[in-house]
Amino acid sequence: MAHAMISILALYNYDSEIFEQLELPEDADRQTIIDKILIDNAELSMVYTEPETVKMLIGNWSKIHSPNWERILEALAAEYSPIENYDRYEDFTDTGSSSTQQSTGTTRKVAGWNNDSALTPSEGVDSSGSGSASNTNTRTGHLHGNIGVTTAQQMITEEVKLRSSITLAEVISKSFKNNFCIQIY
């Protein structure tokens, strides 16, 4: 039994709901990704040609890959400086305590000509004491810049290369091609 060769574009033109079960990250533009799949794979024949089967398989495939696509989207949307290759945040908490024991005092004693032979305090100051102290210091630091391994120009070149070659739509379209299209040219 020979199978009919049919492309994703032909399937989509026949049944525009074949992407109905496609799961994507929340911030992904659904129609842009569908369009990218259709454009990139329009002339390739599909492994599966029955629309209901393709719809179900697209749902399963995207459910499996959606968590990875979410992480890719987060990475591509991350805020950073393309000319810095060092970015460190630090939080420090220093805790210290001390205690002191102090005893100082002067007592002056005198003896009189009375019937008692013991010394009697006449005047004086007795002082003694102790104390403790504790402190906590919290500091934060942000160290960033270029550590000199790569020049700013090299980092800019890599940033341009990255941004011109990797998009979420591109990643999903390539995955679709690898999973659903016959790649014999």
Image (cartoon, rainbow, N blue to C red):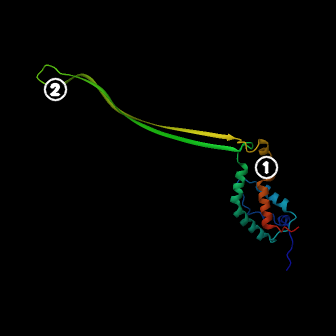
Q: Nearer the viewer, residue 31 or 137?
A: 137
- In-front residue for pair 160/12: 160
Q: Is residue 55 visible?
A: yes
**Residue 68 - label:** none
Q: Is residue 171 left or right of residue 138?
A: right
Q: Quadrant of residue 150?
A: top right
Q: Which residue is mark 1?
A: 163
Asked whether 39 or 76 is in front, the reply is 76
Label 2: which secondary element: loop
Q: CA distance from mark 1 to mark 2?
A: 97 Å
Residue 47: x %, y % from top left:
81, 70
Residue 118: which numbered mark, if any? 2
Measured from the top left, where is residue 132 in percent x and y? 40, 35
Instruction: Give x and y (percent) for residue 8.
Output: 83, 65
The residue positioned farthest toward the top in the image shown: 113
Residue occupying the point 67% across, 43% down: 87
Q: Could you say which is closer to the camera, residue 166 or residue 59?
A: 166
Front label number (1 vs 2): 2
Helix, strand or loop for disc 1: helix
**Which of the 4 image quadrants contains residue 148?**
top right
Query: In the current view of this chain or complex, which residue is farthest to the left?
Result: 115
In the image, is residue 102 above or below residue 162? above
Q: Earlier in the sequence, mark 1 or mark 2?
A: 2
| Residue 25 in sight | no
Q: Amino acid at mark 2?
A: Ala
The part of the image, by quadrant, that contains residue 111 is: top left
In the image, taking residue 41 as reference, residue 101 lies left or right, namely: left
How many neighbours does mark 2 have within 10 angstroms: few (below 14), some (14-19), or many (20 or more)?
few
Residue 134 percent coordinates (x, y): 44, 37
Q: Quadrant of the C terminus?
A: bottom right
